Amino acid sequence: MLVKRLYLNQLKKLILPGKISLIVGPRRAGKTTFLHQFLKEKANKERVKFVLGDNLKIQEILSSRDQKLLSEFVEGVDLLIIDEVHFIPQVGYSLKLLIDTHPHLKIVATGSASLDLVHKVGEPLVGRKLTIKFYPFSIYELRRTYYRNDFELKQELEDILVYGLYPEIFLTPQKRQKQLLLSELIESYLLRDILTLENLRYPFLLKRLLQLLAFQISNLVSWNELARELGTDVKTIEKYLWLLEKSFIIISLFSFSRNLRNELKKSKKYYFVDLGIRNALIQDFTPWQKRADKGQLWENFLFIERLKRAALRGVQSNYFFWRTRYDQEIDLIEWRQGRIHPYEFKLKKIKPKGWLKFKQAYPEATKLKVINQDGFLNFVA
């Protein structure tokens, strides 16, 4: 059964003459399949040209600054679609030239790492690009386009928490095959892309760093401790974390601090964009009910699915966690439309010990919501 991606309405709104619409997200998240779904549903008579960024001939043309060559390339084209645009050297300058000289032209491009798009696409296109963050499958999408009812979704939730929501892995029924595909995804796509494109000096550190982070999801992370554990310096750790985040493998969360002297102000947490990747890195596919890290997985799952939901609905929010030096904490602070919305993630209905202190410091905050297994769907879907 096909999972219909729900980014379609966003893309339609962003495709404008004289603009480039960038769809950025992790490798194998379904961007190419989505583009084909988009083209299939197009009802107008636009003339479309679809090209692949890893094609050497396309790279030669679109890395050129030859105005005549570029004009011939898009002659008779209304919509140019470039899949995996980050493979094309210096493509941003060519796209700028196309947009400036062909104001009727619409351009859609996909890329698997925002770090490449910053270097190769972003700078020349300031004011000319619009961006969509594209994630693996989300509970928001599955609830609307795949499962017939919430009961079916909840029946598969435990497998989702272990194997994640990358399309190929999710749609593979055999668990052993899921495990093999996840390992292949890490080695052949996610890590290889960073190593190849960034020419890292210490490539062996990258996977080891990810493994350390995998054990620390939902916990505070110290760059100094990571550096000591890996036998390297803090600057290297900082660079590698930045690369991993810009490659959509991990996402960082800053601490929320405004009022109290004992609030943690410079701390960070890291979460994995996909739990299947996290579990594959530490080779732990223990069934959900037998896991010792259920609380960590639950927190990671809810935060990431909340991000996906916001991306699909076009909601603009900033996210933080809150903690004091006395271990009083709130798992997620969502700053939305000038309001503070606190959330706590629990497997059972337990009131967090930090709530009263937080409410005293931030009386303007909305009422705390505890998200557990009974009512999580309305939070993420």
Image: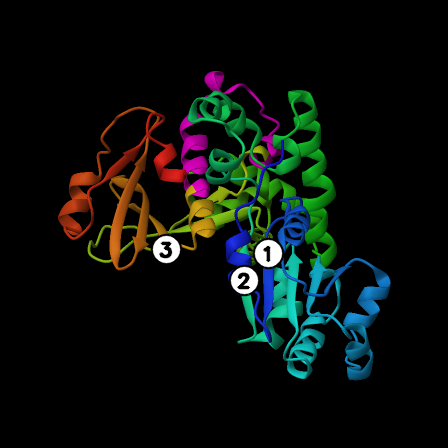
Position of residue 232 relative to residue 125, above or below, is: above
Q: Please name the amino acid that badge 2 sits on.
A: Thr
Q: Residue at x 77, y 79 (%)?
A: 71
Q: Which residue is mark 2?
A: 131
Q: Which residue is mark 3?
A: 317
Position of residue 189 relative to residue 257, above or below, is: above
Mark 3 vs mark 2, CA separation in Å: 16 Å
Mark 1 or mark 3, which has the lower sequence index? Answer: 1
Q: Which residue is the extreme one toward the top?
A: 290
Asked whether 129 or 93 is in front, the reply is 129
Determine contact: label 2, label 1, CB under 8 Å.
yes
Is residue 380 visible in the rendered image? The answer is yes
Q: Residue at x 74, y 42 (%)?
A: 188
Determine contact: label 3, label 2, CB under 8 Å.
no
Asked whether 186 or 230 is in front, the reply is 186
Question: Few, some or many C-alpha atoms within 10 Å of disc 1 (few <14, some 14-19, many ≥20)?
Answer: many
Direction from residue 286 to residue 201 in the image, left or right: right
User: What's the magenta bit mostly, secondary-structure-wise?
Assistant: helix
Mark 1 vs mark 3, CA separation in Å: 19 Å
Q: Quadrant of the N terminus?
A: top right
Q: Residue at x 53, y 29 (%)?
A: 160
Q: Position of residue 113 (x, y in %)?
A: 63, 56
Question: Few, some or many C-alpha atoms within 10 Å of disc 3 (few <14, some 14-19, many ≥20)?
Answer: some
Q: Which residue is mark 1?
A: 24
Q: Which residues are magenta?
A: 277-305
